[in-house]
Amino acid sequence: MKKAYVYILASQKNGTLYVGVTSDLQKRMYEHKNDVIEGFTRKHNIKMLVYYEEGNNIAEAIEREKYIKGKKRIFKINLIEENNPDWNDLSKEWFNRLDSSLRSE
């Protein structure tokens, strides 16, 4: 079975939050960071991956996404801060490596 991910993006520390689900987290983050898809995250400049969790399949991830979306903002903030207290962009290194390899070609 294909893995799936639930993730939380933030516009900045304690900024606007977005909860999403995907089967390809790296591709999805590339799309968010490069404004490939129109919508809420593009409109509000939400590009920092501050939390994610891996599920066993897309159905499980969608259920978890609905659960998290149904919770109050403080629940989401606590979830982020338990795992990423400095609100670092967890995907930043993915694209720095890619960018540097492209520049060296």
Image (cartoon, rainbow, N blue to C red):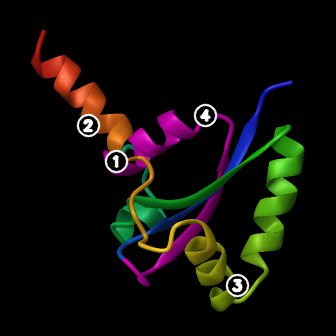
Cα distance in 3D space between marks 1 and 4: 16 Å
Mark 1: secondary structure: helix
Label 2 Cα neighbours within 10 Å, binned few <14 / some 14-19 / many ≥20: few
Report helix, strand or loop for mark 4. loop
Dot 1 crowding, Cα within 10 Å, few <14, some 14–19, many 20+: some
Amino acid at circle 4 = Asp
Which mark's residue is nearer the viewer, 1 or 4?
1
Tell me the residue that label 4 is attached to: 24
Do tag 1 and tag 2 residues touch (Cβ < 8 Å)? Answer: yes
* Residue 89 sits inside the magenta stretch: no
Say what amino acid the circle numbered 1 marks: Lys
Q: Mark 3 points at which residue?
A: 75
Please state the extent of the stretch shown in magenta in the rendering: 13-35
Residue 95, percent from left and from top: 32, 36
Disc on the earlier residue, 1 or 4: 4
Q: Residue 96 carries which label?
A: 2
How packed mark 4 is, by other alpha carbons closer than 10 Å (few <14, some 14-19, many 20 or more), is few
Which residue carries the number 1 mark? 92
Q: Are marks 2 and 4 in contact (CB under 8 Å)?
A: no
**Three-letter code, disc 3:** Phe
In three-dimensional space, the C-alpha distance between marks 2 and 4, rounded to whole angstroms, equals 18 Å
Magenta stretch contains residue 16? yes
- Frontmost of labels 2 and 4 is 2
Alpha carbon separation for disc pair 2 and 3: 31 Å
